[in-house]
Image (tube, rainbow, N blue to C red):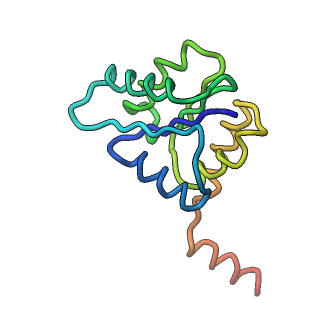
Amino acid sequence: MIAVIVGTHGKFSEELLRSTSMVFGELENVAGVTFEPGESVSGLVDKFKAALDTLEWSDGVIFLVDLFGGSPYNAASRIAAGYENMDIVSGVNLPMIVDVMVNRSTEQLGDLADLAIRAGQDSMKSFRSIRDSQIEEEL
């Protein structure tokens, strides 16, 4: 099973994982890493490495981070650059994590990253846009 590490600025990762467990249930082989004010990227690399030490990642690791090019992304990339079985997806949100949790035991790492991106994008909806298109269909 592919391991999952959620890394974000502040406590966002902890709250995302708490919300994910409300939707998905118990989370296994998952870790959250926080990047707090005043911490360095090298300190964050150490936090990611400590998280890896708690996970079983022989099938791979997917890092789900908040911002492309942000400190969690940069720290994860320092680690992932040395491994073929690691990937990083930015823009983490709750639907993305849930989709990763549902599919990580049956998908390969690359396909799982693609699914995560699609889930994140597909979850972005505008009520007004949906309502307006439904009204147009009824006409």
Rendered residue at 70%/30% (across/down): 109
- The x, y position of residue 35, in whole percent, is 33, 36
Residue 112 lies left or right of residue 61; in this view the side is: right
127 over 117 or under it: above or below: below
Residue at far top of view: 82
Residue at far left of view: 38
Question: Which quadrant does the C terminus fall into?
Answer: bottom right
Residue 98 lies left or right of residue 110; in this view the side is: left
The front one of 6 and 25 is 25
- The x, y position of residue 102, in whole percent, is 70, 49
- The x, y position of residue 26, in whole percent, is 58, 52
Residue 7 lies left or right of residue 39; in this view the side is: right
Number of numbered callouts drawn: 0
16 over 90 or under it: above or below: below
Q: Quadrant of residue 43?
A: top left
Rendered residue at 70%/38% (across/down): 112
Question: Which quadrant does the N terminus fall into?
Answer: top right
25 over 106 or under it: above or below: below
107 over 81 or under it: above or below: below
Q: Quadrant of residue 84?
A: top right
The front one of 26 and 32 is 26
- The x, y position of residue 36, in whole percent, is 28, 37
Rendered residue at 47%/54% (across/down): 18
Rendered residue at 55%/39% (across/down): 30
